[in-house]
Image: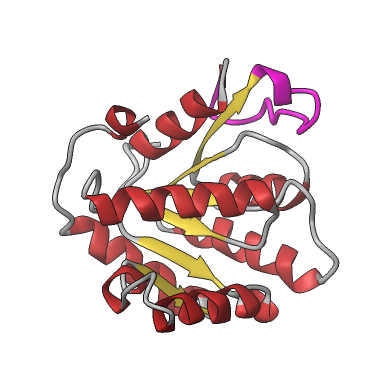
Amino acid sequence: MADPSFSICVYCGSRPGENPLFADAARAVGAWIGERGGQLVYGGGRSGLMGIVADATQAAGGRVVGVIPQTLVDKEHARTACDELHIVQTMHERKAMMAERSNVFLALPGGIGTFEELFEVWTWRQLGYHDKPIGLLNIAGYYDAMLEFLRSSVAGGFMSEWQMGLMETSTDIDTLLPRLVQAAATAVTQPALRTVI
């Protein structure tokens, strides 16, 4: 295919989760990316939501770039069918490459790895290392408790509304993804993210 019109880095679980709506959302996100000629950048696994979003992207005609550390190749069952599969040595390399190859960040339901990746790119944005839009897809109320905690952090004086505004949250794919891609088209170009690692 031609060069992708946009590149979305998706953070999500290497497990499917208990609620089938999580898998449905991952499938819908992948289809949305592929149908619009976009590129998925993700953690390179073939299990859980990671595999579902990658399969759906390619099935809809999109391009898939996977980045996975050697130590996780077996654990996360690397998806060799990616258009590009990069096997790196460290998590720092993985996250830097994923960030550099993307112009949008999106978090779906996931576990501690998803949380860590989301909070890192959110922190980078508040520090000015990038101005790439960040989205949180809150499927079936999965992130309700986390968002409530974050609001309590604002109320407690440890965060600001400005910081909260650096991440857009929605329950609807067809609302969130167009906004993120449009915002990416007007984002300010910043130095490569590897400079903060």
The quarter of the image holding the N terminus is top left
- Can residue 37 be seen at all in this image of the molecule? no
- Is residue 78 magenta-colored? yes
Residue closest to the far right: 18
Closer to us: 30 or 20: 20
Q: How is the image coloured?
A: secondary structure
Q: Quadrant of residue 195?
A: top left
Q: Nearer the viewer, residue 80 or 104?
A: 104
Residue 126: quadrant of the picture: bottom left
- Establish if 176 lies above or below 51: below
Coordinates of residue 70 in the picture (x, y in percent): 66, 17
The residue that appears at 43% across and 65% down in the rendered structure is 135
Q: Which contiguous range is marked in magenta? A: 70-87
> Which residue sits at x=70%, y=54%?
111
Asked if residue 13 is positioned above or below residue 2 in the image, the reply reads below
Residue 86 percent coordinates (x, y) = 54, 21
Residue 164 placement, left or right of 26: left
Give the percent coordinates (x, y) of residue 22. 72, 67
The image position of residue 120, as x and y in percent, is 44, 47
